[in-house]
Image (tube, rainbow, N blue to C red):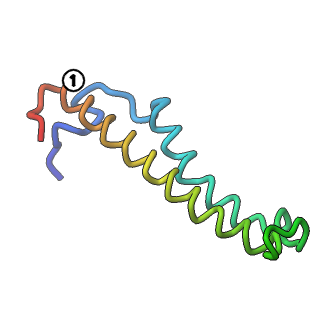
Amino acid sequence: MPDTPDTPEKTGDPVVTPVRVVIALCLLAPFVAMLWVGSYAKTDPVYIGIPFFYWYQMLWVLLSTGLTMTAYTLWQRDQRARRARSGGGAK
């Protein structure tokens, strides 16, 4: 497989950076929140007649959207910065 200009070996950029850790946390948080069923498997508190179990999950749909958008924006910014440092052309 040929080396591309974005490979860390060629550019000297570290693979794990603080920005990439934040991206990973943004993408991991919804999975952890939804897989930890014991934390939300209850009916109280009820919000406008909807048990906690349901509105908590619906809230995470919105939160997941925001976190995914944040991760995508950070990823794009990180890729542009890496291309600029390596001397590659901007797209």
x and y, in percent, of residue 88 in the image: 11, 32
Element class at badge 1: helix
Quadrant of the image containing the C terminus: top left
At label 1, counting other C-alpha atoms closer than 10 Å, the crowd grade (few under 14, some 14-19, many 20 or more) is few
Residue at coordinates 43% horizontally, 51% vertically from top-left?
69
x and y, in percent, of residue 22 in the image: 52, 38
Q: Is 14 in front, or is 53? A: 53
Asked which quadrant contains residue 75, the reply is: top left
x and y, in percent, of residue 64 in the image: 55, 58
Asked which quadrant contains residue 32, the reply is: bottom right
So how many labels did they put on this image?
1
Image height check: is 15 above or below 13? below
Q: In this view, does 72 lie to the left or right of 25?
A: left
Residue at coordinates 48% horizontally, 43% vertically from top-left?
23
Residue at coordinates 25% horizontally, 39% vertically from top-left?
7
Residue at coordinates 80% horizontally, 67% vertically from top-left?
47
